[in-house]
Image (tube, rainbow, N blue to C red):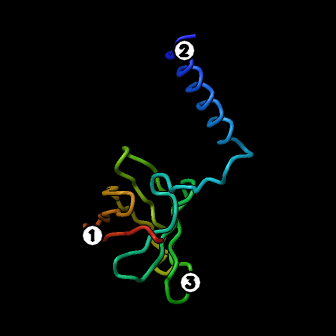
């Protein structure tokens, strides 16, 4: 056998072992947030917004009171549209949020108000 064949055989064996270790019996994996899924805090610190499976919820940071519910959808890879149903005002509004990074959303409401959300650690 040539050195190249031995090296190739070892490489294949190492790769196969690595693949089998990443299965159910392998080490635990840390789940990384995808898209906008997860919790976000406004830079004003007033509310925590959560995005989960197309559903939107916003709660007060000080009391935990539910402030708004709604939905969201991707308009493009880096833009989402959020429909916000305010529980306090009994109104429905929309906002567009640009995904600036994995940790920041820059949003503009239908009335032109701008706000920033940062991913909660």
Q: Which mark is residue 58?
A: none
Q: Mark 3 falls on what kind of element? A: loop
**Looking at this rendering, what residue extends furthest in the bottom direction?**
62
Q: Give how far apart the Cα atoms at labels 1 and 3 are.
A: 23 Å
Do the residues under discs 3 and 2 have CB atoms within 8 angstroms? no
Q: Give how far apart the Cα atoms at labels 1 and 2 are.
A: 62 Å
Q: Give how far apart the Cα atoms at labels 3 and 2 are.
A: 66 Å
Specify the quadrant of the image occupied by residue 104: bottom left
- The residue that label 2 is drawn on is 5
Q: Mark 3 or 2, which is nearer the eye?
A: 2
Q: Which mark is residue 65?
A: 3
Mark 3 neighbour class, 10 Å CA radius: few under 14, some 14 to 19, many 20 or more: few
* Residue 30 rendering spot, x and y as whole percentages: 58, 57
* Residue 81 rendering spot, x and y as whole percentages: 39, 55
Of labels 3 and 2, earlier in sequence is 2
Mark 1 neighbour class, 10 Å CA radius: few under 14, some 14 to 19, many 20 or more: few
Specify the quadrant of the image occupied by residue 5: top right
Mark 2 neighbour class, 10 Å CA radius: few under 14, some 14 to 19, many 20 or more: few
* Residue 69 rendering spot, x and y as whole percentages: 53, 68
Q: Quadrant of the N terminus?
A: top right
Residue in the foreground of this view, choosing between 15 and 70: 15
Q: Mark 1 or 2, which is nearer the eye?
A: 2
Of labels 1 and 2, earlier in sequence is 2
* Residue 48 rendering spot, x and y as whole percentages: 48, 75
**Looking at this rendering, what residue extends furthest in the top direction?**
1
How many numbered dots are placed on residues in this image?
3
- The residue that label 1 is drawn on is 114
Specify the quadrant of the image occupied by residue 114: bottom left
Q: Mark 2 falls on what kind of element? A: helix
Q: Mark 1 falls on what kind of element? A: strand
Residue in the foreground of this view, choosing between 45 and 21: 21
């Amino acid at each position: 056998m040539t050195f190249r064949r031995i090296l190739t055989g070892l490489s294949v064996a190492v790769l196969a072992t690595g693949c089998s270790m990443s299965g159910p019996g392998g080490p635990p994996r840390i789940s990384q947030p995808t898209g906008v899924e997860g919790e976000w805090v406004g830079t004003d610190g007033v509310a925590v917004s959560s995005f989960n499976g197309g559903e939107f919820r916003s709660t007060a940071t000080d009391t935990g009171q539910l402030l708004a519910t709604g939905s969201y959808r991707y308009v493009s890879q880096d833009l989402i549209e959020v429909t916000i149903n305010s529980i306090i005002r009994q109104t429905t509004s929309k906002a567009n949020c640009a995904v600036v990074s994995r940790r920041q959303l820059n949003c503009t409401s239908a009335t032109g108000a701008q706000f920033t959300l940062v991913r909660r650690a």
